[in-house]
Amino acid sequence: IMNIDHLCKCVFTNRGTVCTYVDCMGDTFAVGPDGGIYPCYRFVGMPEYVMGNVHDNPGKEDLAESEAWKLMFRFRDYVDRECKDCSYIRHCRGGCPYNAIAPTNGRIEGVDPHCRAYKRIFKEINDRAAREWETTAVPPFGAAPTGKASIMSLMFKRL
């Protein structure tokens, strides 16, 4: 249910709420067992995605010089270009960079391969929310939902 909850929050807030659906480059890092710094935990153990090492005490500027950092920003720029007309760009930002880049050995050939599924899910959430909004009284913000669980109750639920 947590994943559905987060997807509903993406629609309600009109922005990603988990790392799969945000521009996490530069804001999220992972450290491997050897001290290697990666753009995300999913890249840990892949030498081509090491941005630095904690033992070297690098600054953000040092990490930004790495090829892995630059690749993540090229992916973001690709998403900005290729997804600019997508209704859901603010919800998903092209999906997970790992899902898009790792299978192609670091080449940017598309967005997250789950894009079509994400779009279907976001559309369904939008459609259900619109129907519920028209037919259901919305409880005051923070109030406990009453009755049957709904998309709107997930949207108003605190993370």
Image: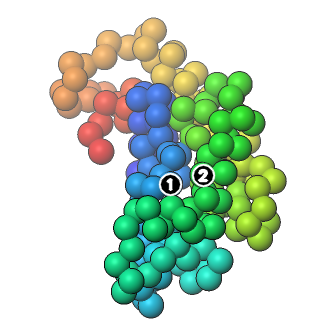
Q: Secondary structure at mark 2?
A: helix
**Viewer-proximal residue among 8 and 22:** 22
Q: Is residue 101 left or right of residue 131?
A: right
| Quarter-of-image position of residue 47 | bottom right
| Quarter-of-image position of residue 154 | top left
Q: How many marks?
A: 2
What amino acid type should be assigned to the residue bearing mark 2?
Phe
Residues at badges 2 and 1 in contact (C-beta under 8 Å)?
yes
Relative image position of residue 137 (x, y in whole percent): 32, 12
Q: Which mark is residue 73?
A: 2
Relative image position of residue 62 (x, y in whole percent): 46, 68
The C terminus: image quadrant: top left
Q: Residue at x 36, y 86 (%)?
A: 55
Dot 2 crowding, Cα within 10 Å, few <14, some 14–19, many 20+ = some
Residue 79 against residue 67 in the figure, above or below: above
Q: Residue at x 50, y 54 (%)?
A: 25
Relative image position of residue 102 (x, y in whole percent): 70, 68
| Quarter-of-image position of residue 70 | bottom right
Q: Is residue 47 left or right of residue 114?
A: left
Q: Is residue 32 left or right of residue 69?
A: left
Q: Is residue 139 visible?
A: yes
Q: Secondary structure at mark 1?
A: loop
For label 1, the residue is 25
Toward the bottom, the furthest residue is 34
Q: Earlier in the sequence, mark 2 or mark 1?
A: 1
> What's the CA distance linking mark 2 and mark 1?
7 Å
What amino acid type should be assigned to the residue bearing mark 1?
Met
